[in-house]
Amino acid sequence: MRVGHWFDGDGAILRVRFANGMAEANYRYVQSAGFRVEAKQDRLLYGNYGMTAPGPIWNQWRRPLKNAANTSVITLEDRLLALWEGGGPHALDLDTLATLEKTNLDGPAGRLEAKEPFSAHPKRDPLTGDIYNFGVSIPGRNARLLLYRCDHAGRLLARRHFDLEGIPLIHDWVMAGAYLVFLVPPVRIGVLSVLLGLKSYSEAMTWRPELGTQILVFDRTRLDLVARGDTEPFFQWHFGNGACNDQGDARLVLDLARYPDFSTNQHLREVASGRTSTPARATLWRMLLEPGSARVHEQVEVSPRSVEFPTLPSAEVGQGWQRTYLSAHRIGTDTTAERYDTLACFDHAQDRFTEADLGDGRYPSEPIVVADADDPRQQWLLSVVYNGNEDTGELWIYNAAGLADGPVCVLALPHVVPLSFHGCWRPAH
Ligand SMILES: [Fe+2]
């Protein structure tokens, strides 16, 4: 049985540990409740982001949604959290990747309740170690944006909520200096057809360009709304970073991989079929906005290249940065039919796009930037690569400052690791 959308696959986690001059790896599915039931019966039973539950109509009501735990991970001191934006996190053992429990982040400010999601894009403040995140719950006709602040151990320290208009799709957000910024794209979910079991969430989404993109700016300390504004319609899954501009004008600067519309969702649905025919191409954009009014001062496309998964060193999250690392299409690649086939760096100060050459048939996942343990000025870029020539999985490591020089190391993995979404680096303690 095929799933309905790339986002419907069950979460599996690859762990690669570097120690004593060696690398070791393990790779395991997250044992979510839904995964365990399906594994036992050896068939798909649940609905998900892009598929309704297989089988008779009453299955839609009995098994509307499986927490796939498949989008990203964040490490805490003693646990790994597997994240999925429609539900709560699963806690895993850092070494064995054994699934321990569904966790509710219990802390001084309470806990996650059953229908309160914790998205797959938390941000860790590099100065305090606090973890900020959001979730979108659907209590009725309008969605609710839940804002969370947790300490380094994942205990909930503060939470607020903000009522949204309709039910939008929000995947990522920006920490920028003293602010949390959301760009709410003009996508709305007709939740009634989902509740009736007629459509999956993805199928119930409509592109509503007349609504424009809504800008919400929150104060990071109080988690309350500072300003809301609007700008032209576009769509983004991912932001690179945000910061308070150091030019003295107190404006916020943020980067995103911007699509002109929502056709990316159809494109990603087609990924699950093995053949993509809908064009969907994102480019790196920079936005300058006034936090007090949410007014946009400037929006520019900083590079015309097809990119996704913008990222940067964890020490620069929410602060000024110079280089954004990306997955990208090579020049000449058919961006409609092909996955991302190279890694790249955009240097904002030098206005320069540099890229690696992985050769034909090699497909990298999101790059992960790692600061060298001995020399923090030295950074490495890690990416799990599917080698389509050999049908193998590999981990490629680059000197982040020299992508064009080729990898400094390629590690063979014992099995193919499917094209994936997000990852993180946990330094040795
Ligand atoms: Fe994502």
Image (spheres, rainbow, N blue to C red):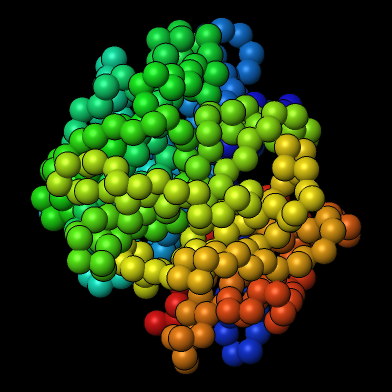
Q: Name the residue furthest right.
A: 389
Q: Residue at x 48, y 79 (%)?
A: 371
Q: Residue at x 34, y 33 (%)?
A: 231
Nearest the viewer among 356 and 120 is 356
Q: Quadrant of the C terminus?
A: bottom left
Where residue 198 appears, as percent x and y from the top left, is 53, 9
Relative side of 296 to 361, left or right: left
Residue 91 seen in render = no
Where residue 273 appears, as percent x and y from the top left, is 75, 30
Residue 304 seen in render = yes
Q: Quadrant of residue 21?
A: bottom right
Q: Residue at x 30, y 70 (%)?
A: 126
Nearest the viewer among 36 and 250 is 250
Relative side of 225 to 95, left or right: left
Above or below, 315 relative to 154: below
Q: Quadrant of residue 151?
A: bottom left
Q: Residue at x 68, y 32 (%)?
A: 279
Above or below, 312 relative to 214: below
Where residue 187 appears, as percent x and y from the top left, is 43, 25
